[in-house]
Image (cartoon, rainbow, N blue to C red):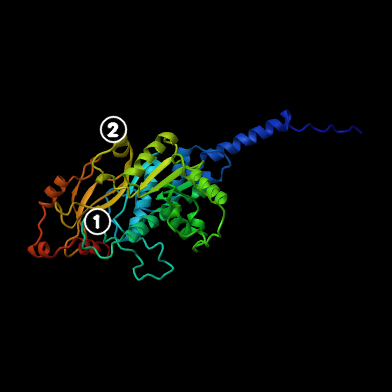
Amino acid sequence: ARRERKRPRPASPLGTVGWPYTATVLLAFLAAILASLPTSHAFYAPKPISTATRHQMIGNVFGGGGGGDKEPQLPKDVKDAISKCRGAVQKGLENKISRMDIEMPVGANFGVENKKGGSKNKRGNLASMTGEDEAQEGLTMEKLQTSDRELARLFVEMFQPLGGPHIAAVFNDEYLADQARRRWSGDLSAECNVVAIDRKGKKRGILNAGGKKGKKKKARGFAAKMAEEMEEDNASSGPFNLPEGTEVAIFVAPGPKELIAIERICGEVGMGTCIILLNARLSLIEKYTTEEARKLFVEEFETVWSLTAASQEDAPGCLIHRAYPGNWILARKPAVGPPKTIAAKEEGGAKFTGEECREAYGTIEVSELEKGTEKLAENFAGWFK
């Protein structure tokens, strides 16, 4: 009997060239799939990414915020203000803005540190809009520092997708930095490097990271004391630098003195590192030390979020607001009813000046009763009820 010859199977186009070629094709195929995924899915791809791309990815995971609203919407309470601020920051990251200025009301209570204490005011209070009104109740230095620290804590949490080692919360001095370390210790959503521009503030009797006062040191000899002093001097000497690997630096309520260090840092790290100023109050600075400094803080830093009082001499009871990429608006809360926008800048317009606020305020009708009884703190307290 004739044996039937087995028909040869058709050769596989991959099998004819061996496994190396097959593996190469498969890897190329997987790479093509990963490249087609949305940006938010790219967190799962084990490949290096640029800092600009990382910033955009962080923005995508923020969620919410209403940053895409065509018409600017004033926040109704603290929670809404944070949500909208988050959305504005997200938009800034998507547009590769790495120099951001954030300004919240003076002394605002964000309710971060009093959650465990069961505070009656759970939503927080934005009544404290400006330090110009000395009649505001209970606005102390401690409350101002708490407000700035709470805002910093919220921003640290926003950027947690980067990982704590890549986030730096920068305070003006070591005392303020240590306060943050104590309160954020053990909180996984607040992981970051907490550092200070002025590192000579350790001798102010502050609490350590464990929340307890340091134990009294035993009497030591002259040599031991000298060694300790030299160690402290070495730690605090030299110009301030960000921790290695920092991708987002959050500077908390810097003043004119700290802005000098920030200007140097911006030049050293370049645009690849995101620099965020919280409550720097740049609009209150009348003159900068150099033209380069003025250009940096006035032109290069983008006001991504601002919620502040207008000059009460020019526009009593009015507030100036901007949420990137929206325009600047001037609004007022009447005695009855919701807040009303009384003026808005055109696209690309600068912040309202005192004269512009006065002109806009002059176009609205204010009753004699409101003129006689209106107080800044009381008026703004009504914004968020």
Is residue 71 positioned above or below 292 on the image?
below
User: Farthest right residue?
Assistant: 1
Is residue 138 positioned above or below 8 on the image?
below
Residue 350: x and y in percent read 23, 41
**Tag 2, which secondary structure?**
helix
The residue identified by callout 1 is 131
**Tag 1, which secondary structure?**
loop
Measure how far apart labels 1 and 2 are at the Cα level.
Answer: 28 Å
Residue 197: x and y in percent read 42, 45
Specify few, some or many for label 2: CA neighbours under 10 Å numbering under 14, 14-19, or 20 or more: few
Q: Quadrant of residue 205?
A: bottom left
User: Farthest front residue?
Assistant: 222
Viewport quadrant of the N terminus: top right
Q: Earlier in the sequence, mark 1 or mark 2?
A: 1
Q: Which mark is residue 8?
A: none
Residue drawn 32% across the image and 59% down it: 141
Camera-side residue: 165 or 66?
Answer: 165
The residue identified by callout 2 is 291
Is residue 24 positioned above or below 231 on the image?
above
On the question of residue 38 being in view, the answer is no
